[in-house]
Image (spheres, grey):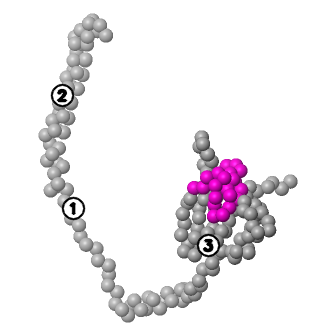
Amino acid sequence: MDISNIKLIFTNKVAIITVLLTVLWISTDVSQRLVNEPKQNSRSSNVLDVKAFFLPNVPMQTAAQIKQAYKKYRTEVASVPAPLSGMTAAEQSQQTGELPALFVGEHKLVLKAIVHNEQQRSALMQITNIKDKSLRVEKFNDLGDVYGFQLQVINNTQVQLSKQNVNERQLITLTMYKLEQKKT
């Protein structure tokens, strides 16, 4: 903007009225916010009238009648102890091939992730203690030991666990998930 445009604004009656109204509006707004607001927001003016809510007292006879009426809809649940979902040592030594989980002793191992960085690859496994049902996630390095098995990362979703038993070598491919083969 040059000086001629500024002179034109100050000589134009509509522009002068607009500027005056804007200045008046701004000054009114500022005065209301700074002067009146502390009075409106004081804590004493925001006191809520809170009343306690009491549940109705039901006489014992009525409560007994209600329980009796609903008794026919209730079923008795017999407490059945949860079976130990583990394997015997003989069954554990027979585990081979591609599996979603591996049982070793009192632990169940499930592959959760394969992690790559510049130096090495690692596998994250969820380990469930079968007896006390506790869970934890552990990190095992490629070519490291996993409960007596040697771990080798195959790809982003599989690891191979190998162990030399008395008369044979046990090879297990632990997978995060199993891909379904399309039927043709």
Circle 3 or circle 2, nearest the eye: 3
- Pinpoint residue 52: horizontal percent, then vertical percent: 25, 72
| The quarter of the displayed image where residue 34 is located | top left
Task: Identify the mark nearer the N-term, 1 or 2.
Answer: 2
**Closer to the camera, 91 or 183?**
91
Mark 3 in CB contact with mark 2 (< 8 angstroms)? no
- Rendered position, 35 above or below 58: above
Locate residue 177: give its quadrant.
Answer: bottom right
Q: Please give the label number shown on residue 48.
A: 1
Q: Amino acid at mark 3?
A: Glu
The residue to which callout 3 is attached is 106
In the image, residue 64 lies at what x, y percent? 42, 92
The secondary structure that dominates the magenta segment is strand
Q: Which image quarter holds the N terminus? A: top left
Q: Residue at x 80, y 68 (%)?
A: 167
Other residues around mark 2 within 10 Å, as few (<14) / some (14–19) / many (≥20):
few
Q: CA distance from mark 3 to mark 1?
A: 59 Å
Q: Residue drawn at (76%, 69%), measured in percent from left and top?
A: 166
Q: Which callout, 1 or 2, points to the residue nearer the camera?
A: 1
In magenta, the rendered stretch is 139-161
163 is within the stretch colored magenta: no
Estimate the x, y position of residue 30 in percent, counting from the top left. 18, 34
Q: Which residue is mark 2?
A: 24
Q: Residue at x 59, y 84 (%)?
A: 80
Q: Residues within 10 Å of mark 1 (few under 14, many from 20)?
A: few
